[in-house]
Amino acid sequence: MLPDQKLLRIPGPTPIPPSVSRAMSQPMIGHRSQEASDLIETIRPGLGPLFGTSEDVLVITGSGTSGLETAVVNAAHPGDEVLVIVTGAFGDRFAKICDAYELQTHRMDVEWGKAADPEQVEQYLKDHPDIRVVFATFCETSTGVLNPIGEIGKAVKSSSDALFVVDGVSAIGGVRAKMDEWGVDIFVTGSQKALMLPAGLALIAVSQQAWKVIESNPQKRFYFDLKKYKDKIEGNSTPFTPALSLLFGLKQVLELFEQEGLDEVFNRHQLMMKMNREALTALNLPLLTDDRDASPTVTAVRPNGFNAEDFRKVIREEFALSLAGGQQNLKGKIFRVGHMGYSSPADVLQTISLMEVGLRKIGVHVEFGTGVAAAQEVYTNWGEK
């Protein structure tokens, strides 16, 4: 193992492209300068297509969780009844934020590893007509589940007047999103996942319906007041000091997306998901989610017959390969493989090969090349159908 070599295969933070690192190392500029305004003006048109919206995307200096809290304090009036669809640790985080603001929080808890059922959401809203906001998670990072946001959005809009707020932190940039078509009112993401940047930017898109609610909302807020960001973005600025180095990097990320083409970006993530799932299945490693609910950005494995933490430890020590562990009630019970952002089929083949060695190291008998061959078959045949 080389001392500076790190193989980061977790669902965030993710590896950063060299060209993005170079972009972020540019000399600092004044955040109220014309250069800064020009930078923001250049970035703005490339953000909407990632969310699938014609609305402006607002940029907040903060983590993904800052974006979730921003969504809560702007969408929900004090004391509102809200529904949080909880399919894992990050749905639970949405609920905790709502509780912190003393909202009347309804939880729809779904078995971890399963996606939410839109029909159940629709019926819940019919049974609770005073719910004003519905919160959901697009990709539930803790389980590798991709929730059917389009179908849930249709259920929300057909059965209520509630706003629909979605955490897209580990999905935007790796999974096709259709905010306007799906009826999403506030869509949030963070920079350190499929957007291939360090943590520090929260990006938020807001519908016209949501703006009507936000503008009449008496909830006290200062830094997270979206009205301030809306006013400033129209002049290519921000209300508070932006993370300029990250904006330099974001500009380069958008150029990389344009060069590859968004359709191909999403296709690459689908391919990596399929390669991982077929390889892990060939190695007789039980997957936490079924194919229908699987996320293109992260795959969760529930080992049978060996300890997930022992496995993660040996591949980290032998190869500097980092996989993620489980969270909350899945802690120590699963491991998660990230395949998003600056990640390619070549990375998947390397990761699967090293995992095979790691399994042997902890006493799990696998035939070398079994998982790799399965992934190679997927890659070779991809796109032929």
Image (cartoon, grey):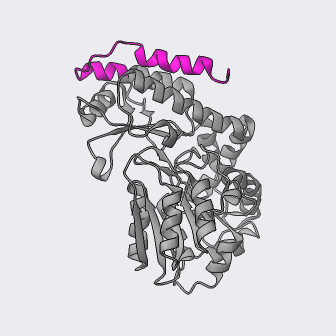
- Residue 258 is drawn in which quadrant? top right
| Magenta: main secondary structure | helix
Q: Is residue 160 magenta?
A: no
The front one of 259 and 153 is: 153
Q: Is residue 313 above or below residue 362?
A: below
Q: Picture coordinates of residue 69 (x, y %)?
A: 49, 69
Number of numbered discs on residues? 0
Tell me if residue 356 can be seen. Answer: yes
Q: Residue at x 42, y 31 (%)?
A: 4
The front one of 126 and 308 is: 126
Q: Is residue 336 above or below residue 203?
A: above
Q: Is residue 104 above or below residue 58?
A: below
Q: Is residue 208 left or right of residue 287?
A: right
Q: Picture coordinates of residue 221 (x, y %)?
A: 52, 80
Q: Residue at x 56, y 21 (%)?
A: 378
Q: Is residue 359 magenta?
A: yes
The front one of 232 and 33 is: 232
Q: Is residue 50 left or right of residue 112?
A: right
Q: Residue at x 28, y 28 (%)?
A: 314
Tell me if residue 241 can be seen. Answer: no
**Which quadrant does the C terminus fall into?**
top right
Q: Picture coordinates of residue 178 (x, y %)?
A: 68, 53
Q: Which residues are magenta?
A: 356-385
**Which quadrant does the N terminus fall into?**
top left
Q: Picture coordinates of residue 362 (x, y %)?
A: 23, 23
Q: Residue at x 60, y 71 (%)?
A: 240
- Residue 47 is drawn in which quadrant? bottom right
Q: Is residue 105 left or right of residue 304?
A: right
